[in-house]
Every structure is written in structure tokens, then in C-alpha cells.
Image: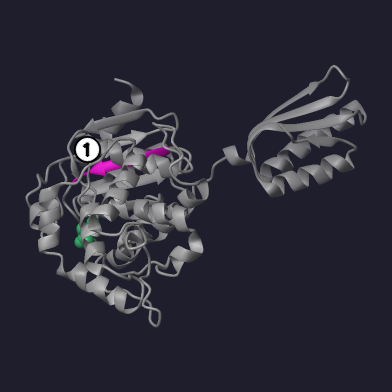
Amino acid sequence: MDPIRQMLTDVLDEVRPRDEGELAQYIPELARADPDRLGLAIVGPRGEVVAVGDADAEFTIQSISKPFVFALVLDALGRDAVLRHVGVEPSGEPFNAISLEHETGRPANPLINAGALATTALVAGGDATERSAHIVAGLSRFAGRTLRVDEDVYASESATGDRNRALAHLLRSYGHIDGDVDGVVEAYFRQCSTLVTVCDVAVMAGTLAFGGRNPVTGEQVVSARTARDVASIMTSCGMYDGSGSWLLRVGLPAKSGVSGGLMALAPSQFGVGVLSPRLDPHGNSTRGRLLLERLSESFGMHVFEQHEGIAAPGVVIERGDDGAVHVVLDGELSFSGAERVLAAVRGVDVELGGEQLVVDVRAVRQLHPAALAVLREQVGDLGGRVHVEV
Ligand code: GLN
């Protein structure tokens, strides 16, 4: 077995015996799920998916849909238009809380139900069918395959969805939803009832982890800035009122759903999807949390873990045919990386007695403006130049 699959299998076996938590009861169709289901998938930057356990089991996406629908409207309408109707602050309250800002009636964030309803209302579409079709098509682009709605779960959500209806009507009273409020709620129920597997969730998470580009299909689904915005909100609000301890222990942007799905992403590294239906009191998958704690530890994925890479670009120093000293850089060049390069260049310059100097950054994949500014200034002081254009 390849080492990654072996590691994932070990983590899965480790958490398998844990049976704390309860199935979500308030949507009757979800209460019938098999509580022992356990699946895990990860996707890397080149789109290779590794899945273990119940990898093919379909479940409804539920609240994991919220960050993706938010991404779609953010990309389509821009930050200002969207943030007029939904905030970006952690609510510190359960997912279904009536958590609206004092005077504006704006929901605290798009990852609790109130904010998700306001977000769904921003999706284009005249009626519930059209809006729902847009949403399912958008979610499918994140997953890289055509997804469909579980009509039984949808009917069950709709039949017991009075709290969400009440929330939506309240939002309309503040002007955050206009027009067909019941149509918005039905589209939201259909959104939550979209069927996915842990592989789909991993690829969806991966699309956010890799700058909005689906690592399997190669499609740029949303912009890199949108992907970053959504990951930021997931970091502060994704695990509801358990978000603080999640950040401490796991340290990854994440989102849970009441059917026991869980997704997490390590920017530039992995997208992760998990299924395990028993939930803790916050409504987050119990074994899902344990799994992610173990994974984050063994893969060194905590976002605040110190990473050397950003401060260490690739550097090759060579003498060109023209007799000049060429310093060829690649990878990512950050401010701290530029400092390192300059230290190396100064060493060479002394040795070579101020020969002509060219710092070549054409192969740098990510060049931060502050890095370029400091490089230009200091290489200039040494009598050299920075070669930027491709
Ligand atoms: N459809 C569910 C609801 O609105 C989604 C909630 C969740 O997954 N936390 O109640």
C-alpha cells in the first residue's frame, strides 16, 4: 500500500471505535442515516485523490454547501455588494441561531443558517427551480462532476423547515431578501440536499486550497481572491461556536454539515473530505474532528505552523556568457525570502569585485510586491538590475 493511503487508513482505524455523539434528529430523513459510516478523502495539488473507508457513500452536503454558494455570489457580485447583506464575524452561537446584527439586521456571517439564506437569495434566478439549478451547477464545478439533489431529504427538510422559513422572513423585513422569500428557502433546502461523497468534498475543498482552481478538472471556478476570502471566513466561523478550539487544535479552515460531513483545507497543500454522521453538541462530526486533529498533526498542516518554504526561494547563482553574475530565482519570493537572496548576492558581489549583476525573477511563480521593491532598491545600490518581464 502506498504510504499516504497507509497513513490515512491508520488514522481511520484509530478513530473507528469512537462512538460519541448523536445523529441530527431535526430532519427526519437524516436521523435514518447509518451512524457507523466512516470515510476520508484527500486531494493534492496535482489532482490525485486518495480515499479510504466509505469513499463512495453519498450523503447530503448540508452546511458544507454554504462556503461554496458564498464563493459563487462573491465572485459574481464582488465583496461590497455581498457584504451589505451578510457580515463576516463569528456569531459564537449555534448554526440555527437568530443571529442578526443589531440595527441592520444583517446575519453575522454566511456560514450560519441566517447568513446562508441571505447568500442563497443573492444567487441569480427568478424562481426556486432556476436558483436551485444555478446552485447545483456551481457546486458541481467545485466537485468536478455533475451533482444531484436527494429529493427525499429535500422533502424532509422542507416539511420541517419552519425555523429557516422564519429566519428568511425576518431577513426580508430588514431588506436582506427581497421578492419570493419562500422560493429562496426552497432553493436553500435543495442546496443542502445536494448529494456528495467524501471524494467530492475533498475536491471542492481542494478548489479553495489551490486558489479557486479545481485540481482535478483544471477549471478556474472562482478567483484566487474569492477562494482566500472564503477560507478566511471558514477559519473564524466554519465550525460554529466550536471554531476557536478547532483553530487551536486543528488549525485549518473547515466547514461541517449536520449529515456528518466535514471538509477542511490546507492552503496550497490539500483538500480534505470526511464523513462520520454522529455529531457533537456544536453540530460538528465527532470522529471527523478527531480525524482532522490527527491528520493536521501528522501532515504538519496547521496554518500557523512555521513554514520555511516561503522564506527560502530557489536560488542559482551563475556567470553568464556576457560575464555578468546571474542570480536566477524560482518558487515563491516573499519579503523575508528577498532578504535571504540579498544576503547571498552581497557575498558573491564581494568575491567578484562588483561585476555586472542581474537578478532574474522571471521564473518566480509568486512574487510579492514588497519583495520586488526591496530587491530592486538593494540590487540597484549594488549596481545591478532585476530582470522581471517574461
Ligand atoms: N439544512 C440544514 C439546516 O438548515 C443545514 C444545517 C447544517 O448543516 N448545520 O438546518
Q: Secondary structure at mark 1?
A: strand
- On the rendering, which quadrant does ligand 1 occupy? bottom left
- Foreground residue, 5 or 220? 220
Q: Main secondary structure of the magenta part?
A: strand
Farthest residue toward the bottom?
A: 103
Image mark count: 1
Instruction: Using the rendered image of the protein, determine whether residue 285 is visible from the camera's viewpoint.
Output: yes
Q: Is residue 101 left or right of residue 353?
A: left
Residue at (36, 77) in percent of width and height: 105
274 inside magenta stretch: yes
Residue at (84, 26) in percent of width and height: 325
Residue 37: percent from left, percent from top:
14, 41
Q: Which residue is mark 1?
A: 39
Instruction: Using the rendered image of the protein, determine whether residue 281 is visible from the camera's viewpoint.
Output: no
Q: In this rendering, is residue 283 above or below 305?
A: below
Farthest residue toward the top?
A: 321
- Foreground residue, 359 or 14? 359
Residue at (30, 35) in percent of width and height: 145
**Is ligand 1 closer than 8 angstroms to the Cβ of mark 1?**
no
Residue at (17, 48) in percent of width and height: 277
Residue 274: percent from left, percent from top:
26, 42
The magenta region covers: 270-276
Q: Is residue 323 left or right of residue 375?
A: right
Q: Is residue 50 left or right of residue 164?
A: right
